[in-house]
Amino acid sequence: SGKKPTEIGAVRKLGMAGTKDILRERLEALSPEEFLITYSVLEGPLPVKNIRTSMRLRPITDSYGTLGEWSTQFDTAKG
């Protein structure tokens, strides 16, 4: 896409483990302050459409740990 990897709208290609399949993803949101990243899948071999995934890290202050939250939304084919 010609954009820096951390720039909103940047597109990357990912190989899927154990296959020759490729995913193309676009960075939709990146907030270091909120420890948040969101991306959408533009194309790939997945059986769903309009995939949008977010990941966020939150501190667990009483144990000095980290909670990782991962959510994905997508559309499935009718039937």
Image (tube, rainbow, N blue to C red):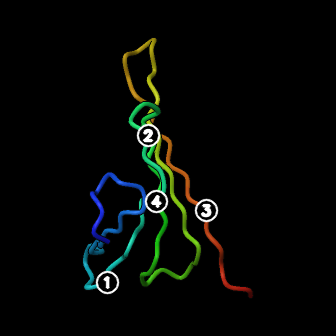
Q: Which mark is residue 31?
A: 2
Nearer the observer, disc 4 or disc 2?
2
Q: Name the residue carrying label 4.
A: 39
Q: Earlier in the sequence, mark 3 or mark 1?
A: 1
Q: Nearer the viewer, residue 56 or 12?
A: 12
**Figure check: 65 above or below 25:** above
Q: Are marks 1 and 2 in contact (CB under 8 Å)?
A: no
- Please name the residue shown 42% across and 46% down the image: 30
Q: Nearer the viewer, mark 1 or mark 2?
A: 2
Mark 4 Cα-neighbour bin, 10 Å: few <14, some 14–19, many ≥20: many
Circle 3 sits on which residue? 73
Q: Disc 1 to disc 2, how far (Cα)?
A: 29 Å
Question: If the image is split into quadrants, where does the N terminus sit?
Answer: bottom left
Mark 3 or mark 4, earlier in chain: 4
Q: Amino acid at mark 1?
A: Asp
Mark positioned earlier in the residue sequence (1 or 4): 1
- Tag of residue 21: 1
Labels 1 and 2: the sequence-earlier one: 1
Which of the two discs, 3 and 2, sits closer to the camera? 2
Query: Which quarter of the figure is the C terminus placed in?
Result: bottom right
